[in-house]
Image (tube, helix red, strand yellow):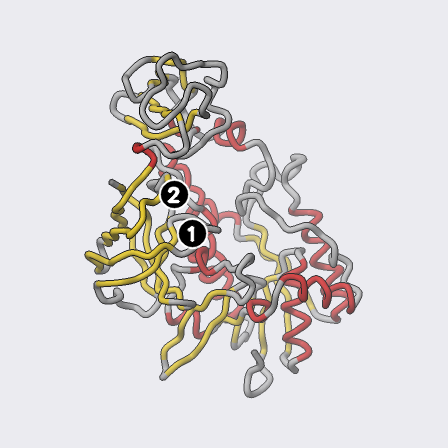
């Protein structure tokens, strides 16, 4: 979406195709574009999993093709204080956090935004698939137009001040068009595959990574009848709904439990932190994996105030279709939702994000479900 007049826009160049096309589109619209590459992690920067060096080379060659300046900025200390410490605290407490949500709120749209403003930027831009709309002096966060790529879920903690300074040019386009533009203008990373790893971990083996930072106590794995089936390696390493890597694949049922047949897969269903017990159940549709209500805290509302009680839609995980629900309670401290249809494996630590059609209202961190 073109601005009324050319502005100085600082673009977060990640080395990926989306941010590269973002910079190109803004330049085409007549803006003065400056690129910044953010380095957020350096603990094991020389390992095979950390692609920071290659990403910077890709970002620099994009800047070269586009004819823009690029600056390398290190936010690793901010990241460790504001994102990673919280990430570890949540895992140690048995929850499953979403660091990408916190990274956007604390680094990309706080530390990076502050840095860009110091460089004289009027706006910042990133390659996220989302949109910003100004209406009657308020800023709305909208879903990206490509439903398969929409990233508003990860951006739901952005506030009015942040959105007023932010542009998401590729949010107006389908991913196929972004790839086409990249190839057409000869960007060196036009065919680079999308990053799927957690924002600082990359594609490395997750359990091995966590093991370096968390102390964990092994304990029993039990089923819904209280029978011990094996031993877990530490509750932090498991998430609700997890099917692979539980370590009881060879266990066969005699007289199948509720909700599962003899050969049905096992799923992580509950964690008893006090007793250090991991509970698993058989069958995707087992009652222990279904919830009609959830509560959330640590809330953040895009408009600056909670939405009214009543009908709404929500996602309890990324890539889920919006689920019809009712807001039973909402303020700045507590949110309670009830769903028309049962939700599967609602996971404490993940984000519950509310929508009114294409408008992302905000949300909070799931604290419990029933």
Of mark 1 and mark 2, the one earlier in the sequence is 2
Against 256, is 114 above or below? Answer: below
Nearer the observer, 291 or 236: 291
Q: Position of residue 340 (x, y in %)?
A: 29, 52
Q: How many marks?
A: 2
Q: CA distance from mark 1 to mark 2?
A: 9 Å
Element type at mark 1: helix
Name the residue rendered at 50%, 58% in the picture. Answer: 151
Name the residue rendered at 53%, 61% in the picture. Answer: 147
Say the numbered circle drawn on residue 86: 2
Write down the quadrant of residue 314 in the picture: bottom left
Element type at mark 2: helix
Write down the quadrant of residue 292 in the picture: top left
Count neighbours of disc 2 (C-alpha within 10 A) and say few if under 14, some if 14 to 19, many if 20 or more: some
Question: Which quarter shows the C terminus?
Answer: top left
Name the residue rendered at 38%, 14% in the picture. Answer: 229
Say the numbered circle drawn on residue 124: none
Q: Position of residue 92 (x, y in %)?
A: 36, 32
Against 127, is 99 above or below? Answer: above
* Residue 19 visible in the picture: yes
Nearer the observer, 303 or 221: 221
Residue behind mark 1? 102
Relative placement, left or right, of 23 versus 267 is right
Question: Which quarter shows the N terminus?
Answer: bottom right
Nearer the observer, 157 or 353: 353
CB within 8 Å, label 1 to label 2: yes
Relative placement, left or right, of 302 versus 130 is left
Q: Position of residue 164 (x, y in %)?
A: 43, 74
């Amino acid at each position: 979406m073109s601005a009324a007049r050319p502005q100085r826009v600082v673009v977060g160049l990640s080395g990926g195709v989306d941010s590269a096309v973002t910079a190109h589109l803004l330049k085409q619209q007549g803006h003065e574009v400056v690129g910044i590459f953010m380095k957020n992690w350096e603990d094991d920067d020389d390992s095979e999993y950390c692609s920071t060096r290659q990403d910077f080379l890709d970002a620099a060659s994009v800047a070269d093709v586009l004819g823009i300046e690029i600056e390398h900025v290190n936010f690793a200390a901010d990241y460790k204080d504001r994102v990673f410490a919280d990430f570890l605290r949540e895992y140690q407490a048995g929850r499953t956090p979403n660091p990408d949500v916190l990274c956007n709120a604390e680094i990309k749209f706080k530390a990076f935004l502050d840095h860009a403003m110091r460089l004289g930027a009027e706006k910042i831009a990133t390659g996220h698939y989302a949109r910003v709309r100004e209406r009657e002096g308020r800023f709305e966060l909208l879903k990206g137009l490509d439903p398969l790529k929409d990233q508003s879920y990860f951006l739901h903690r952005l506030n009015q001040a942040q959105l007023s300074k932010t542009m998401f040019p590729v949010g107006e386009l389908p991913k196929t068009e972004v790839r086409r533009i990249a190839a057409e203008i000869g960007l060196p990373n036009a065919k680079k595959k999308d990053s799927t790893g957690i924002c600082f971990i990359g594609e490395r083996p997750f359990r091995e990574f966590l093991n370096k930072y968390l102390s964990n106590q092994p304990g029993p794995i039990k089923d819904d009848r209280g029978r011990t089936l094996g031993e877990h390696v530490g509750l932090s390493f498991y998430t609700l709904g997890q099917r692979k890597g539980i370590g009881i694949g060879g266990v066969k049922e005699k007289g199948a439990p509720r909700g599962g047949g003899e050969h049905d897969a096992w799923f992580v269903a509950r964690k008893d932190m006090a007793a250090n017990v991991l509970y698993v159940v058989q069958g995707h549709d087992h009652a222990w994996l279904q919830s009609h209500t959830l509560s959330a805290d640590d809330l953040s509302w895009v408009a600056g105030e909670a939405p009214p009680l009543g009908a709404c839609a929500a996602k309890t995980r990324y890539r889920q279709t919006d689920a019809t629900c009712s807001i039973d309670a909402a303020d700045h401290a507590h949110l309670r939702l009830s769903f028309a249809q049962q939700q599967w494996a609602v996971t404490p630590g993940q984000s519950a994000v509310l929508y009114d059609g294409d408008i992302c209202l905000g949300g909070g961190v799931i604290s419990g479900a029933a």
